[in-house]
Amino acid sequence: MGILIRNGTLVCPEGPVQADLRVDGGKITAIGKDLPVESCQVVEAAGKLVFPGFIDTHTHFEMNKGLVNETADGWATGTLAALAGGTTTVLDFSEPQRGASLASALDTWHRRADGRASCNYGFHMTIKDWNPAIRAELPSMTRAGITSYKIYFAYDNLRLSDGDAYQVVQAVAAEGGIVGCHCENGDLVSAGIAAQKAAGRMGPEAHPLSRPAVVEAEAVNRWLAIGEMAGCPVNIVHLSTQRGLEAAQAARARGQKLYVETCPQYLVMEDSKYLLPGFEGAKYVFSPPLRKQEDQDALWAALESGDIDTIGTDHCSFNYKGVKELGREDFSKIPNGIPGVEHRPVLVYTAGVAAGKITAHAMMQLLAAQPAKLFGMYPQKGALQVGSDADITILDPNQSGVITAAGQHQNVDYTPYEGFQTACTVDTVLLNGELAVSQGEVLQTYRGKYVSRGSCAFWR
Ligand code: URP
Ligand code: ZN
Ligand code: ZN
């Protein structure tokens, strides 16, 4: 039996249209006015916004396996929360052990995700070591559907040298893929942490002071220099500062091909959170940290102008009780990361579309179409058009909501967005052509499929 979504505002590639949309066999089979009901199950969408299923290109489920500070969300809970929040595909960061092969990480991530995922999923691959053996694995990664990679300039156990980063960028580009970089200068972060401790600042308030905007801006500039010299497109993940953004805008103005991701946390919160009484500030310890109002304003302006390409969550959830608390005496021991995979669509809709900062069409580009293009899934994913996969999210702008830890599906004991009033709710989600969420209720679990991705499309 098909599904007919009736009378909605479809946020299509060419813009919003009032129309019906029909789904059969997991695909969108018709879009038009007054489509016949025939034998279809009808979903009434009058007054609602119908989007291609949202894609979160930045999650960390089941990270730090085996350690005390393992993430709170594994694949079962993380992908269920994603689905409940209107995200139909996640791209998670698989990460080899130091000295281990990329294939070993891919096996581990498949073992964790396959059969447990309630939304569709793919993997980026993290490169921690760069040597001939790892380079030789890239073609097999491409065949396995992995066309995007992440490297780090921060974290001593993760980061690559500039020379290795240059080689990674070229080798990945030869495969039709792209590399994203965690742009913070690791040596300056270490110096910043030491300086805060020497000044006797040991609480969460020291976290943003230890990694100020210049730490990101330097790394963005360096990453862009590497991309320019390599002659290959590069991606900047979780951009948080106006200074970093200006570096990207300047490079684009010179003709460089680059892509920029930011995250909801940098769009709706500021660094005053670190001054909350008690140890509350620990709930906001992630990297890069929260910034100033002027950074937030610059990021919104760039979302409106099209200078930022994607919004991912960087979902990396650690419980407050017993885990964030590991850093009670020393902020540098607070596990870095926050939850968010469930709430990105309603946050971006509320703070962006309902607030008049971006259009619903821009939201569709940022959360669906551009992620799908950049990461080799378009137009199978990310588009409401005949022939595309029937991953569809319907938001109801006539219903408001409130984000609370008590009401979330994320398996973590807090949300950084506690009390946030949303200007819409997630009404309906179709996953692979099946009704997966109806009137906000999750109807099915573990039906997510692995998305084997193709070459990245560099549309700009
Ligand atoms: O604090 C963060 N962002 N943790 C997750 C890992 C990363 O750097 O993306
Ligand atoms: Zn990162
Ligand atoms: Zn991340």
Image (cartoon, rainbow, N blue to C red):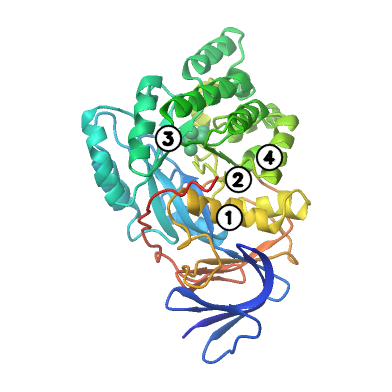
Three-letter amino acid code at disc 2? Thr
Residue 85: image quadrant is bottom right
Q: Nearer the viewer, residue 267 or 369?
A: 369
- Label 4 to label 1, Cα distance in Å? 30 Å
Query: Could you tell me residue 21's position as x and y percent?
Result: 58, 77
Q: Residue at x 63, y 43 (%)?
A: 264
Query: Could you tell me residue 394's position as x and y percent?
Result: 62, 67
In the drawing, does residue 35 fall left or right of residue 318? right
Q: Residue at x 68, y 70 (%)?
A: 17
- Label 4 to label 3, Cα distance in Å? 35 Å
Three-letter amino acid code at disc 1? Gln
* Residue matched to label 3: 69
Farthest top residue in view: 198
- Disc number lying in front (2 or 4): 4
Quarter of the image that includes the C terminus: top right
Tag 2 and tag 1, C-beta contact below 8 Å: yes
Within 10 angstroms of label 4, few (less than 14), some, or many (20 or more) residues? some
In the drawing, does residue 212 fall left or right of residue 402? left
329 w.r.t. 19: above or below: above
Q: Which mark is first along the chain, 1 or 2?
A: 1
Question: Element under label 4?
Answer: helix
> Which label was assigned to residue 302?
4
- Label 2 to label 4, Cα distance in Å? 26 Å
Question: Element under label 1?
Answer: loop
Q: Which mark is first along the chain, 1 or 4?
A: 4
> Which label was assigned to residue 408?
1
